[in-house]
Amino acid sequence: MEKRLITKTREEEILEKYKKYRISPWVVQSKTDHRVIAKTEGCFLWDASGNSYYDLWSQFCFVNVGHQHPHVVEAIKSQADKICALNPGMANEAAGRLAEEIVQVAPEGMAKVFFTLGGTDANEHAIRMARVFTGKNKILSRYRSYHGATMGALSASGDPRRFGAEPIPAGFVRVPDCYCYRCPFEKSNSECNLLCARHIETVIELEGDIAAVLIEPVVGANGLLIPPPGYIRTLKEICDRKGVLLIADEVMTGFGRTGRWFACEHDNVTPDLMTIAKGLTSGYEPLGAVILASHVADYFQSHSLPCGLTYSSHPLSCAAGVAVLEVMRDEKLIENSERLGRFLETELEAIKDQHPCVGDVRSIGLFGCIELVADRETKTPLVPWNSTGATTNPTKEMTNYLMSKGILPRIRWSYFNIGPPLNTSEDELKWVLHNVNEALSITDEYVQKS
């Protein structure tokens, strides 16, 4: 333990204000348990008492360049000295430069950028663009997806968080995911023939009026579902045949998380619209965007764009984005993600062999998941989908164990998520995975007793 960073009295004052005046997202307010963070740097956070924690989920999988990177911090300060705020009708250097940088790293054929405040409203505006461009109404998405918390984005999501918004507006259709470990069509990899992708063509035909298919190229928060090779390519071919746009939600997967700038690159696909956020500024400032392929961008040269936000192209956010992209290039973070991704894949397979509580492991770049089961033969989830779980369940025990070792984990239901900052080192990752391996022994005991 380091020396206390915030006095006990000050810590108590901060927590008191949180409980008295602030509403926390997605939780029962009386059950919130906040930890006061006093300092962040690199891959670590420090609480008020001086305890350090390795940030294994990069907060919500967005701090890609690590905490408090001096180049990004200085860029924000420098921009603040010149221009802090402008309305989106006025040009500023940072926004123009960032838009150019984004197009340069995006898949070939992407042409223009519309800036938003985050991933949710990027998806909202992409949906609107698709409807206007195609003249159609319905949006087809997948059951385990999460596209954001506003009405349109949440309506497109399959994540259980949508239940609080139901009944949702008309015009949203869902299909099963590419969940190879639990194939909804009960196919093995050798016989699947990408049926999960081809099924979407049937749904498009039966539903009619489909404007766009909205997917996360790799499903993130709900189990890290990695599509088999050819899935996204097949889906794009189906969309092109049917006059439907493909929207790739790269909010979580973009900017190096999967070992490429964007996850679509693994299948050599250029989507019609791509939504980004999170890693775009590494979370240092709020920013998202929709990237438009050239044919969609050309359409809006002669048709009105029904989109707008007060803080679109915000100078401070765009300056942060420029600096983040510079760091990613200069420090070769895409390459680091790919290299350590191979190491992570090997280590996860070794962990799987040691623990009966592990049903499956999946990873791509520095994006991994350990799926926990109560029974390997039946694949019974350790914690049911959308369960709040008991306070004494084994995932809670695993969390407490890892916290005691100085690691901040992210476990949701039966999914143990791994997504460290992209500037992590191999030694740090080895240390983390050693402790994860130890923590899984707790769950092994639970499985063996049940």
Image (tube, rainbow, N blue to C red):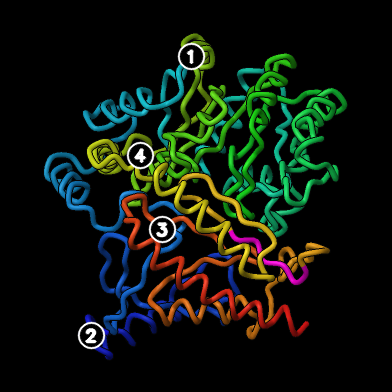
Could you tell me how far apart the alpha carbons at marks 4 and 3 are, in whole angstroms?
18 Å
Q: Which label sits in the foreground, 3 or 1? A: 3
Q: In this picture, is 290 found above or below 166?
A: above
In this rendering, would 157 be left or right of 45? right
SS of the residue at dot 1? helix
Q: Residues within 10 Å of mark 1 (few under 14, many from 20)?
A: some
Q: Residue furthest bottom?
A: 9
The majority secondary structure of the magenta stretch comes to strand
Residue 102, position as x, y percentages in the image = 36, 28
Q: Which label sits in the foreground, 4 or 3? A: 4
Of residues 302 and 321, which is closer to you in this image?
321
Q: Mark 2 = which residue?
A: 4
Q: Earlier in the sequence, mark 2 or mark 1?
A: 2
Q: Earlier in the sequence, mark 1 or mark 4?
A: 1
- Residue at point 61%, 75% (across, down): 395
Q: Amino acid at mark 1?
A: Ser
Q: Quadrant of residue 152?
A: top right
Could you tell me how far apart the alpha carbons at marks 2 and 1 are, in whole angstroms?
54 Å
| Quarter containing the C terminus | bottom right
In contact (CB < 8 Å): disc 4 and disc 3: no
Q: Mark 3 = which residue?
A: 58
Q: Residues within 10 Å of mark 4 (few under 14, many from 20)?
A: some
In contact (CB < 8 Å): disc 3 and disc 2: no
Q: Amino acid at mark 3?
A: Ser
- Residue at point 57%, 82% (across, down): 397
Q: Mark 4 = which residue?
A: 335
| Quarter containing the N terminus | bottom left
SS of the residue at dot 4? helix
Q: Mark 1 = which residue?
A: 294
In contact (CB < 8 Å): disc 2 and disc 1: no
Could you tell me how far apart the alpha carbons at marks 4 and 2 are, in whole angstroms?
37 Å
Q: Earlier in the sequence, mark 3 or mark 2?
A: 2
